Image (cartoon, rainbow, N blue to C red):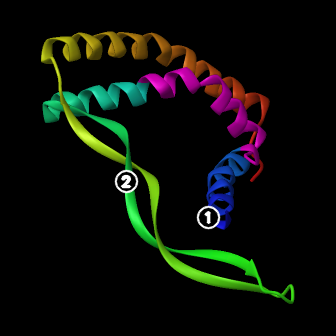
Amino acid sequence: MRRNTALAICLALPLALAACGTPQERCIDRNTSEYRTISALLAEVEGNLARGYSWQERQVVRTRFEQCRRVYRDRNGQQHVSTYGCWRDYVDSERYRVPIDPAAETRKRDGLEARQAALTRGARAAVSACREAFPEEA
């Protein structure tokens, strides 16, 4: 249980820090999210074309031997902990290569480049408007 709590805190921390950005940063993030998404997709497609394959992930259930604990009470009501070896399942992420169709990836790249070019002017206008509305203090 402690591991899950620590994982939740670690995952929530970047979100909390993002919410603490300056008003200008929040405005820019809000108004350029589609542009940043298209740019990330374009970088992924270009990487796929350069490598000749793409990466996929799948969840794999594996088993490992661990020390398990059992709490029991004796005749006097005292709690005792005993340990024993047991097999536990856990889920692991596994990356694997997937072949791509270079022609389809090229068409996808061309479409993303066109969409990025269309969004560039709007993103620049949004950034300048956010900088005017929320000037940074020196």
Identify residue for label 2: 62
Q: Is residue 20 magenta?
A: yes
Residue type pointed to by label 2 = Arg
Identify residue for label 1: 3
Tag 1: Cα neighbours inside 10 Å, few (<14), some, or many (≥20)?
Answer: few
Q: Earlier in the sequence, mark 2 or mark 1?
A: 1
Q: Mark 2 vs mark 1: give the one in front.
A: 2
Which numbered marker is on residue 18?
Answer: none
Question: Magenta segment, principal secondary structure?
Answer: helix
The residue positioned 65% from the left and 31% from the top of the image is 28
Residue type pointed to by label 1 = Arg
C-alpha span from label 2 to label 1: 18 Å
Q: Quadrant of residue 1?
A: bottom right
Residue 21 is situated, as x and y percent measured from the top left of the image, at: 73, 46
The reply, left or right, for residue 83 in relation to residue 99 is right
The residue positioned 37% from the left and 53% from the top of the image is 62
Highlighted magenta segment, given as a residue range? 19-38
Q: Where 85 sits versus 111, above or below? A: below
